[in-house]
Image: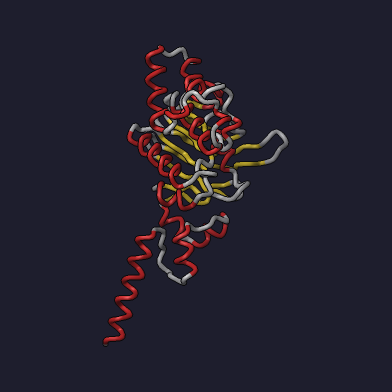
Amino acid sequence: MEGIEFQDVSFHYPNGFLANEGLNLKVRPGERVAIIGQNGAGKSTAAKMMNGLYKPTQGKVLVNGINTKEKTTAQIARMVGYVFQNPDEQIFNSTVIKEIEYMPRYFHLPEEEIKARTEEVLSLTGLEHCRDMNPFDISYSTRKFVTIAAVLATKPLYTIWDEPTAGQDCKHTVILRKILDYLQERGVGVVVITHDMDFVVNTFDRIVVMANKHIIADGTPKEIFSREEIIRESCISRPQVGNIAHEAGIEQTILFRQELVAYLSDWESKRKERQQS
C-alpha cells in the first residue's frame, strides 16, 4: 500500500492544544501536493506527522503501509525527508559538501555512492560554486537549497517542504520548479506548505486547503479558487492574476496571465461586434 495516508488523524500538543482534528488524506508516489491555509490552520503540524517528527494522538499515519507510531522518527525520516522553513534550524556542518554528505555517511553508504549522490544534488540545486564554502557564509536563500540538497541526497520516497519560496527571487523559484519536475519524474512524492499562491497555481495540480485544524477542500487550482466560501473560510489570497480578474468584476475563474489576455481579447472582439451591429 504505497503513499502517505492519514486515517482520521488528530493531534494534541502536550499542553492540550488541539492542532489537527479528523484529518483524512492520501499522497501518492510521484504526486506533488500544495497545502495552503492561514497561519495556525494546522499545516505544519500535519506535515511533521508525515515524517514521524510528531505522532498522532488519534488515528493512524501510514507511510507505504507502515504505521509511524510503530517506528522511530529516524526510521520514518529515511522514507520521508523534511525541509524546514528556516535552513538555520537544519544546517550544522562546516561546509556545503559536508552537510550534503552527512546523512549518506551516517547510513554507511559506499564512498562511490556518496560521491555520486553529492554531485547529482549539487548540480540539481545549482550549488556547485559553493560546495566548499561554509553554509553560513552564503545567502539565506541559497542556504535553503543546501537543506534541500541534503535531504535529496538521502533519496527519500517522499519529501516535505515548508515555505520553500519564502525569500526567493524569480531565478531561484525556477530552480525549485526544476527540482520538483525532477522528483516527479523519479516517482518521489512532494508535499509543499506555502503561502505563495502564484507558486501554487503555476506548479501544482492538487491543492489541499486547511482551516481551523481541518482539511476543508482538496482539488485542482480551478476547483479551489472558484469557490468563494473556501477562500473566505481559509483566509487565503487569490494568485495575483486571479485577484486582478476578481477585482475587475470578471465572474469567470481566471488564474493565469494567458487566460486573462484571452478573456480580454474575446471581450474586446465582442464589444466591436456590438458596435458594428
Q: Is residue 40 visible?
A: yes
| Nearest the eye: 246 or 217 | 246
Find the residue positioned furthest to the bottom: 277
Question: How are the colours assigned in the image?
Answer: secondary structure
In this view, 12 is above or below 101: below
**What residue lies at 43% left-to-right and 69% top-to-bottom?**
251
Q: Residue at x 35, y 62 (%)?
A: 259
Q: Please, is residue 275 above or below residue 261 in the view? A: below
Please name the residue shown 46% across and 52% down the image: 198
Q: Which quarter of the rendering shows the N terminus?
A: top left
Which residue is farthest right? 15
Left or right of 223, for residue 86: right
Would residue 54 appear left or right of 219 to someone viewing this image? right
Tally the numbered discs.
0
Screen quadrant of the C terminus: bottom left
Side of 20 relative to 239 (left or right): right
Q: Looking at the picture, how far across and down is residue 61, in whole percent?
A: 52, 32
Where residue 23 appears, as percent x and y from the top left, is 54, 42
Instruction: Report which quarter residue 179 is drawn in.
Output: top left
